[in-house]
Each structure stands twice: as C-alpha cells, then as structure tokens.
Amino acid sequence: MSAPAPRAPWIERIAASQTVRSGYASLVWHVVALIVLALLVVPREIERKPRPIRILFAPPADEPGHDGGDAAVDLFDVALEPGLEAPIPEPAAVTVEPLISTPDEPAAPELVAAHDPAVPPLPAATLTRPASLSMTKAPAGAAFASRHGSARGDASRERGGSAASEAAVEAGLAWLAAHQGEDGSWRCDLTNCRCGGACRDAGTVGSTTAATGLALLPFLGAGHTHLEGDHREVVNRGLYYLLSRLRSTPRGGDLTEGSMYCQGVATLALAEALGMTRDDMLERPVAAAVRFIVSAQDAYGGGWRYLPGQAGDTTSTAWQLAALKSAALAGVEVPSPTIDGVRRFLDRVQARAGESYGYQGPLDEPSTSAIGLFCRLHTGWDQMDTVRRGLATLAQPGPDPQAIYMNFYLAQALLQSDHPAWPRWNRRNRDQLVAAQARAGHEQGSWFFADPETASGGRLAHTALAVLSLEVYYRLLPVYRPDAVEREW
C-alpha cells in the first residue's frame, strides 16, 4: 500500500482556491472601477480669476451725443494678478504744439506736425463705447477748480506765470504725449516710443512704473484725466498700464519694479487721478498701493529707501510722503503712525536745528535740504520760522539753471509757504525754464539738463519735472495746495 501524497502548504491551498481567486479578481476590478470613477467625478481645479478693476471713461464734452452728464462709454478691465499682461489699445496719433516764443517775446504756440517724416504715427485707437454703461462718482472737489479754462490762466498770472510759461507747458505735454509707447507706458530710455533715435539724452532707469507715473503727473496737473481733457486718451492708456502692472501681494499693491521710488511715483499718479475724478474704480488699487507703502516703511527710522524695510533716505521718503498725502486728500485712509514715522525720520536727518537736511544723516546739502523742507510742510511741522530761514538760505543765490530736481522742490516749498523770496526767485526760474526748452526737431517741447542727480532719468524725466515746475502757479496737484500743507493727517 502506497503512502498518501504529501499535503500542499496552506498558503498554496489558499492561493489555489477558486473562491479566493474570484475574490482577488473582484477586488482588482472594483479598485480599477473606483479610480476611473474618481477621475470622472472629481472636478478639475477651478481657475480663479481675479476681480477686475474697471476704469470707466466719459466722452469729451464736444463729442456728439454728450449731454454733460456722467455717462461712461469706455470700459477697460484690468486684473490684479501677478504676471498678467492684458492687451492695451493702440494710442491715437498726436500733434505737438511747439514753443515759438522767447522769454522776451511770449507768443502762443503754433501747431506743426508731431513727428519727423521718417517716424510714422501710430494708428488711431479703436475704443469700444457700450452705451449701456454708466458710472456713479462724486464730483471732483473745489481744490481742482483752478486747473481748467480761465481759472488756470488767472491763477498763473496771479502767482507768477506768463504767456510764455503756459505755452511751454502745452508744448511739453505734447512732447510727452508723442513719446508714449503703444502699450500706454513711458520709458526713460525712450526704447518704446516712436523716436527711432531722433531724441538725444535717453535715460538709464529701467522701471516702467516710475517713468509712466512721472509722465502722467504733468497731464493730471494740467487738468487732463481719463474722463476729460484734450489728452484724455493719453491719460487713459497711462493709467491702464499702471493698473496692469499692479501686483497683488500680502503687503498690498506692489508697483515697485525693484525700487520703492517707483512705488511712490506710480502711487502718486494713481492717487491724483482718483482725487481729480472721484472715480470709485480707482479706490481699491490706490488703497492697495498705499498699504504697500505703509508696510514697507522702516519701522525704526521711519523712512523709505530702495527696498521695503530699509533705512530711509530723503528722496525716496519724499515720494512716499507725496503719494500718501495725495491719497489722503482723495479720501484714502493713511495711518497716523506712518506720518509720525516720517517726522521721526526728518528729525534724524536734519541739521542746523531743522533748516537743512541730508540724504541719510544730518548734512547741509542744498538739494536734500529743499526736499526736507518740502516734507516738513507736508507733515504739519509747527516750526515755520525755521522752515522760512532754511528756504531763504536756499533761495538767496537764485535758481541754478541746471538743478531741475532741487528747483522742482524749492519752487513748491517757496510758493506754499508764501515766502518773500518767491517773486524774485520765480521770475528767474520761470524764464530759465522757458529759455531752455527745445524748439527744433523731434526734441521740440522737451528739456534736458546737466543735473547729475537726475541724469539717469534722461530727457523724459527732465521734461516731466520742468512741466510740473511750470504748473506750480495754479497749484495743480492737490499735494501742493496750501490746504494740503495745513491739513492734519
């Protein structure tokens, strides 16, 4: 009798079981089925679209069908999203009004072609005008009344302007308009304009937000906004470009492009547009840009420099202060501790008991002293006798014909403080600026100075600063008005 066959190990008996095999197959099938169902049922990640900022534009008063109301007929959507580059309408062709007068024989400007024959103008912009759009906005305050019509001329004559200086302003605005890029921006190196190398003295600053903000300020100063004015389309595109560059960050709306100088200049331009138009669609971006400035302040020293949190310098701090002051006048909240910090910074860099100021420490430097005294006026400093003595020292030798940056600040401070040196100093500064304006070729209407402090800004920055200096008579920018100086934060 043979021995029984050895029994297979239990694991083999389980693996050979038909029941177990059926269970394995069922398990595998159900797992595969669940994976397939999950892929079909689970929704894809929803693409989050940022809430657009709408800028609504009204037609010129002389346009057919315009009844003088607030009907908005253009709509641009600009999203606050890092890296977003929305298409921007092409600008319309513009003409330059050259200055044909001299300081001795002021005359009205004569219209001529804006460009050299070799530089073709851009095609006219095609703008959508949906009739159903409307905008609710509060009227601009009385602070801006002197920017328009006869009030502008009256203010200019009363405060030291002339027919020649007004003609120079118009010619300067025309040059700036002709050098705006197709995307609505300006660049100090003039690489995006239609010059084709026809204009000399290009700058080296790479920031587009700084250049665009600085170029917009003279248009806003002369009463041109995205709602009205002969340069409405220019301002239209410039504001749209700035908003397209606004980056939403945890600190606020970032316009720096690498430097806080750019943040201050660009925020000031947006705040001016908000203050002039009361366009509520600008409120959120201005508030966001202000929040970035506030968060970037040096918590210890109270100033600003290149990067957020750096120990401050006088020039960067002045641009942030101007932006904050203008935003406050436009109704945007600015924390009082931020302004207390500016006062603390000015105390740290003052010399001669507050009559002069240095760059990052106590020094007696003319340019930074003019800027420091300008800042003192805007922080409500109660030492006005000290301010007047400091301004008298700066004004005594007269305006340096090449120092456009210092003269830009000194003109504002002298006029705001109603300084007795203003009439004499202004006459020289005004006539020097008018005489220095280019009158020929593609540079017609622009300026360039041998000013080492602003050399990197080139012809674009110098032209913007010169026009702003000649607009000071009608106190066009709210931050430069007497009530801006006297108002408490």
Image (spheres, grey):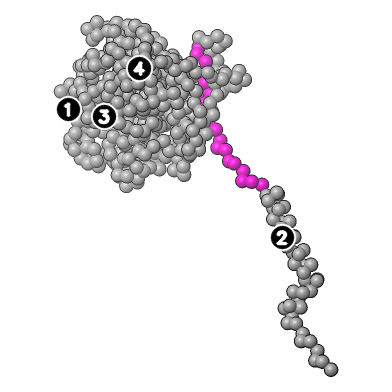
Give the Cα separation between the discs numbered 3 and 1. 23 Å
Amino acid type at image mark 4: Trp
Q: Give the foreground label among 2 and 4.
A: 2
Whole-angstrom CA distance, mark 1 to mark 4, is 35 Å
Say if 260 sits above or below 93 in the image: below
Image quadrant holding the N terminus, namely bottom right
Horizontally, residue 98 falls left or right of residue 393, namely: right
Residue in front for this viewpoint, 121 or 471: 121
User: How far is the residue under mark 4 from the one under mark 3?
Assistant: 19 Å
Q: Residues within 10 Å of mark 1 (few under 14, many from 20)?
A: some
> Dot 3, how many residues are within 10 Å of its Cα: few (below 14), some (14-19), or many (20+)?
many
Q: Is residue 131 above or below residue 378?
A: above
Task: Tell which circle, 3 or 2, labels the residue nearer the N-terminal end.
Answer: 2
Q: Which residue is mark 1?
A: 393
Q: Nearer the viewer, residue 235 or 419?
A: 235
Asked whether disc 3 touches disc 1, contact meaning CB atoms under 8 Å apart, the reply is no
Does residue 49 show up magenta in the picture?
yes
Residue 175, label in figure: 4
Q: Of callouts 1 and 4, which one flags the residue occurring earlier in the amino acid sequence?
A: 4
Query: How many residues crowd mark 2 within 10 Å: few (<14), some (14–19), many (20+)?
Result: few
Mark closer to the chain start, 4 or 3:
4
Q: Estimate the x, y position of residue 300 in percent, counting from the top left.
A: 32, 47
**Residue type for callout 2:** Val
Q: Which mark is residue 454?
A: 3
- Cα distance in 3D space between marks 2 and 4: 71 Å
Report the residue marked by disc 2.
Answer: 31
Q: Position of residue 470 (x, y in %)?
A: 30, 18
Q: Is label 3 in a helix, a strand or a loop?
A: helix
Q: Residue at x 35, y 20 (%)?
A: 195
